[in-house]
Image (cartoon, helix red, strand yellow):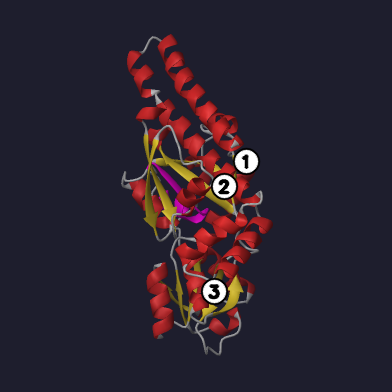
């Protein structure tokens, strides 16, 4: 198909041109390090391996470099793995990099933005609950996934309802633990996202608040600093991000039924619901990558400032200190 042939050609050209450019610089070591075939990218995924699955479905998983995928319950854990040196490339919302950089010594940079839907970002209550809106959470035990979109939109929803964070008994929980607590009566409501919200609804939960119109739809790709010092790793990272964009374009171009079936199997939901969620998500905001710009940095600064007001950040954080345009040229070519 066209996407596959184009990327194969680009990757082949890249593998040929980068060593040549390095050789022109007279550095034999640089020449060998520019070969993308020697690269292994350790990449994070949240919820289920959706990025890996969509690449395979669109026949774009034949990368000229190796990709080692690791699954996490949230983007916050991916950023922790970046900090620990266990990942090269992490995908998350705007929130996890803020907390990962809060000590002022991040070993990563935000290198690209993936625009995406903000559906299934909700505050839910269990079946039979008398709570019908956010105002009803006053004095209640509310679980939330700390340092993620759930943390942010819960705070904003409380503000909109005239409540303070201190008006609820906030309980930081991982998605799976939050679901168990919600069903077991340990918490009265749960703010979460993705598969955990889908599962909660399957178990009878109802929505009392949504982050759909609160969140920006900017999902960030963060790369370890060491990736940015390697021409080959930079090229591979840009190529992978571009492939995911092209894979979703393939899905939107009349291939939604097949990917909905894969999604339904992975998330254990009815096929009709999986297709509706997929169609709705791509209609709200098509999944596609873009380069770093002043507007994307400003969007995250707004989020960081909100967490400073909340007291979750102890002092003002200048987010542009961990953003870079170093991948922009590679990504533009790959896209």
Foreground tag (2 vs 3): 2
The disc, 1 or 3, on the residue closer to the chain's N-terminal end is 3
> On the rendered structure, is 213 left or right of 56?
right
Foreground tag (1 vs 3): 3
Give 205 or 11, whichever is nearer the viewer.
11
Measuring 50% from the left and 56% from the top, which residue is drawn there? 95
Residue 291: x %, y % from top left:
59, 38
Provide the secondary structure element on which disc 1 rests. helix
Provide the secondary structure element on which disc 3 rests. strand
| Gap between marks 2 and 3 measured at Cα | 24 Å
* Residue at which label 1 appears: 294
Provide the secondary structure element on which disc 2 rests. strand
Q: Is residue 91 magenta?
A: yes
Residue 153 appears in which quarter of the rendering?
bottom right
- Labelled disc at residue 114: 2
> On the rendered structure, is 115 left or right of 88?
right
* Residue at which label 3 appears: 123
Residue 295: x %, y % from top left:
64, 44
Q: Is residue 126 magenta?
A: no
The disc, 2 or 3, on the residue closer to the chain's N-terminal end is 2
Measuring 60% from the left and 81% from the top, which residue is drawn there? 135
| Gap between marks 1 and 3 measured at Cα | 31 Å
> On the rendered structure, is 171 left or right of 113?
left
């Amino acid at each position: 198909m066209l996407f596959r042939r184009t990327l194969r050609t680009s990757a082949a050209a890249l593998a040929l041109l980068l060593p040549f450019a390095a050789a022109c610089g007279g550095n034999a070591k640089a020449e060998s390090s520019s070969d993308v075939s020697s690269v292994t990218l350790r990449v994070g995924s949240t919820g289920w391996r959706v990025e890996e699955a969509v690449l395979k479905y669109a026949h774009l998983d034949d990368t000229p470099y190796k990709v080692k995928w690791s699954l996490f319950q949230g983007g916050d854990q991916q950023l922790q793995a970046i900090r620990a040196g266990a990942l090269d490339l992490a995908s998350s919302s705007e929130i996890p990099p803020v907390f990962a950089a809060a000590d002022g010594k991040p070993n990563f940079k935000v290198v690209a933005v993936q625009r995406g839907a903000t559906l299934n970002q909700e505050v839910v209550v269990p079946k039979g609950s008398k709570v019908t809106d956010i105002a009803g959470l006053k004095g209640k035990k509310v679980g939330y996934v700390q340092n993620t979109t759930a943390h942010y939109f819960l705070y904003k929803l409380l503000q909109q309802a005239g409540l303070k964070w201190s008006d609820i008994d906030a309980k930081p929980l991982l998605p799976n633990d939050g679901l168990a607590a919600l069903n077991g009566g340990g918490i009265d409501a749960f703010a979460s996202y993705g598969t955990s919200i889908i599962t909660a609804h399957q178990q009878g939960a109802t929505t009392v608040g949504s982050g759909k119109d609160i969140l920006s739809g900017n999902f960030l790709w963060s790369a370890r600093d060491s990736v940015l010092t390697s021409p080959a790793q930079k090229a591979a990272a840009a190529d992978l991000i571009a492939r995911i964009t092209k894979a979703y374009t393939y899905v939107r171009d009349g291939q939604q039924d097949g990917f909905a079936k894969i999604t339904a199997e992975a998330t254990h939901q009815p096929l009709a619901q999986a297709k509706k969620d997929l169609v709705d998500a791509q209609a709200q905001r098509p999944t596609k990558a873009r380069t770093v710009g002043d507007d994307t940095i400003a969007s995250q600064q707004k989020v960081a400032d909100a967490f400073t007001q909340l007291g979750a950040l102890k002092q003002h954080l200048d987010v542009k200190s961990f953003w870079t345009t170093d991948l922009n040229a590679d990504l533009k070519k790959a896209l």
